[in-house]
Amino acid sequence: MIEVVPPDRLGPVAIGMSVDDAEAALRAHGAVSVGERDGQRPGVAYYPSGLSVHVHTGTGGVVNAVEAFRPIQPDTVSFRDIDLFATPAHEVENGLRAFTEVEIEERGCTLIAPDLLLSLWRPYVADSPQDRDGYYFESALVAEPGYYD
């Protein structure tokens, strides 16, 4: 299970960590594969469920954003008891609106909670749960202040 705690962390990776510390935290959290990176590319970790976590770096090589991508098999990525990838996108939106401002962009594909520095994405909007790619969010990103500027 990955707990999303914006704007501080996503799973074991905290904003402001070094990439080496982030990769070590992901390994300790159960990631089975942590990708190699060159000087500019962030680390990528994969879990047995197919869940992947991408570490983005900013100035000084420290983590400025962390993004999780929906797993192939069940694996929970939750924010305040909302499973961000197993709950229909419209229900996630309603759950977030209950306590924070929510902006919808890209014709419903992107949800941004600016006060939380949290964004969610799906490639298109679908009306049926059988169309998983458009009915559920595909990625969740937690970022540092100023990331979207």
Image (cartoon, grey):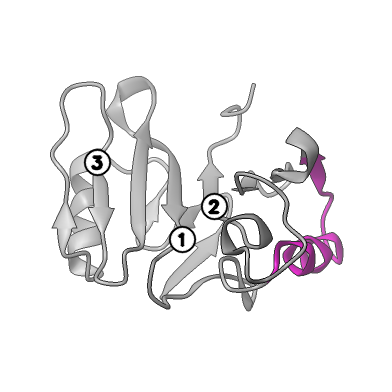
SS of the residue under disc 3: loop
Q: Identify whether 14 is placed above or below 73.
A: above
Task: Indicate which label's residue lies in the foreground, 1 or 2.
Answer: 1
Residue at the (24%, 59%) spot, across then down: 25
Identify which amino acid the numbered label 3 is placed on. Answer: Gly
Residue at the (26%, 28%) spot, across then down: 41
Q: Identify whether 35 is placed above or below 68.
A: above
- Quarter-of-image position of residue 47: bottom left
Earlier-in-chain disc, 1 versus 2: 1
Q: Residue 43 got which mark? A: 3
Circle 2: is it few (<14), some (14-19), or many (20+) Cα within 10 Å? many
Earlier-in-chain disc, 3 versus 2: 3
What's the distance in space between the residues labelled 1 and 3, CA to CA? 17 Å
Q: Quadrant of the C terminus?
A: top right
Q: Which residues are magenta?
A: 88-104
Circle 1: is it few (<14), some (14-19), or many (20+) Cα within 10 Å? many
Earlier-in-chain disc, 1 versus 3: 3
SS of the residue under disc 2: strand
Residue 94 lies in the magenta-colored region: yes
Query: Of residues 121 and 37, which is closer to you in this image?
Result: 121
Identify which amino acid the numbered label 1 is placed on. Answer: Arg
Can residue 27 be seen here?
A: yes
Residue labelled with disc 2: 140
Residue at the (81%, 42%) spot, across then down: 103
Q: Are marks 1 and 2 in contact (CB under 8 Å)?
A: no
Q: Tell whether 7 sits left or right of 59.
A: right
What's the distance in space between the residues labelled 3 and 2, CA to CA? 16 Å
Residue 91: percent from left, percent from top = 77, 69
Residue labelled with disc 1: 70
Q: Tell whether 63 sits left or right of 129.
A: left
Residue 86 lies in the magenta-colored region: no
